[in-house]
Image (cartoon, rainbow, N blue to C red):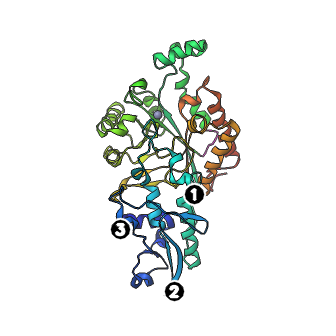
Amino acid sequence: MQAVVRYLIEFLVRDAGAAQRVGYTSDPAEYARYALVVQPSGWLDQVAAPKRALLPDPFDFQGVPVLFGSPQITQIQGVCVVSADWVASAYYLLTRYEELQNPIRDAHGRFPGRESLLSRLHWLDRPLVEAYSRQLRSLLRQAGIPLAPLRPGIVTLTHDIDSARRFHNLRSLLGGIRRRHWRLLHESLYGRDPYAEWEGITRMDSALPWAKSRFFAHVAGRTGEAEDAACIPLQPADWLQSRHLDWGIHFSARAARNQDFLLSENEQLSQAVGHPSVSSRFHYLLLPGPEGWRAVEEAGITDDYSVGFADVPGFRMGTCRPVRYIEPTTGRLSSTLTLHPLALMDVTLSDYARLPFAEALTVAGDICRKACEEGGEAVLLWHNSSLAEGADGYHRSLYIQLLDSLALDGIGKPADSH
Ligand SMILES: [Zn+2]
């Protein structure tokens, strides 16, 4: 637990040197070694038993809900001692510990954002862990500790390719016929499939020239369960590779539930393209349990982009910054795997939150701005199917207008670019 506590303090302070001046102890004999001391609430001692561990009891600390400890702040022997346990609170949020304590799940087996503590606290659309970071940094500054400035934020545009074909099974084919999509049917069957317009997607992404693009492709032939066992194996892996684009594996829903599937999907990809993938996203944003995450590490994945809520936009881990994976019940800090929080998925706005276009554009823009203001990474997910010509215009137009407005405001633009 000591390694993860030091990591969390550094994550909150955002300055390795200054983090050395923060203690996490209730032993007054040690206070003099530090410029600031956070008193442990004792909650971290219970993490091995999620069912019995105390539920958070949020209290207001200078306008920010802290989950464990108390709002006391005192000076002892000239050292600022804070009883608001930011470390345990950050651990609770970053490990999604709540999802071990609360068994509620949606039809796909996902924890709903609307049921989350962050939703109850009205902190879904603001990164709560970054608020703890600001409080800690402010007290350190008051104690005369110099701090490195925050690094500017970035925007990462990601695309999941659930299917590389517009009419990929009998049901979608019949739907196309029923809606009389003759031109699309003809193009899909005999010409260029609108779902496989990869050049078109990269052209749209270039509206935000400083943003990174990343694709997640299925290679297992199945996206979810039997009902959507339909995508074309290995497409568009060859295309992505030939253009040196960043891409990773889109693990199926069953891989999230079963490590053997996960490892075999990864193996199939490695064999097919000659090298293993190092980044991943799970279909449906269905997160694996601790054993599944261990399999992700074992598969050689170093960066995962799955941790976001499907039903509401917002910061599922309370942060907008990439964070090392922490195993919730052991406190094991992964030495290889980094989680990149997902800020927003296309269908969240339409299918789940059911936002009208103008409101969706505002919500999407706000969340990107907030992530970048905190020096974080605004990760967006727009499926290839949402951006295809002839698809529902909502997502395609929203994406184009969103990138235009972010570009206009210079969101995620590196400080040294002109
Ligand atoms: Zn998917």
Identify the residue under disc 3: 2
Does the stretch in magenta take in 397? no
Does the stretch in magenta take in 207? yes
User: Which mark's residue is nearer the viewer, 3 or 1?
Assistant: 3
Residue 231 visible? The answer is: no
Measured along the vertical axis of the image, is residue 273 above or below residue 415?
A: above
Q: Secondary structure at mark 3?
A: helix
Q: What is the count of numbered marks?
A: 3
User: Which mark's residue is nearer the viewer, 2 or 1?
Assistant: 2
Residue 108 visible? The answer is: yes
Marks 3 and 2, the one that precedes in the sequence: 3
Q: Residues within 10 Å of mark 1 (few under 14, many from 20)?
A: some
Tell me whether the residue at label 2 lies in contact with that at label 1, contact meaning CB atoms closer than 8 angstroms: no
Marks 3 and 1, the one that precedes in the sequence: 3
Residue 375 badge: 1
User: x, y percentage for residue 38?
Assistant: 47, 73
Identify the residue under disc 2: 78
**Highlighted range, magenta:** 206-210
Q: Secondary structure at mark 1?
A: loop
Measured along the vertical axis of the image, is residue 339 above or below residue 392?
A: below
Residue type at the position of mark 3: Gln
Q: Residue furthest left?
A: 260
Measured along the vertical axis of the image, is residue 209 above or below residue 91?
A: above
> What is the CA distance from the residue labelled 2 to the residue labelled 1?
32 Å
User: x, y percentage for residue 94?
Assistant: 45, 56
CB of mark 1 near ligand 1 (< 8 Å): no
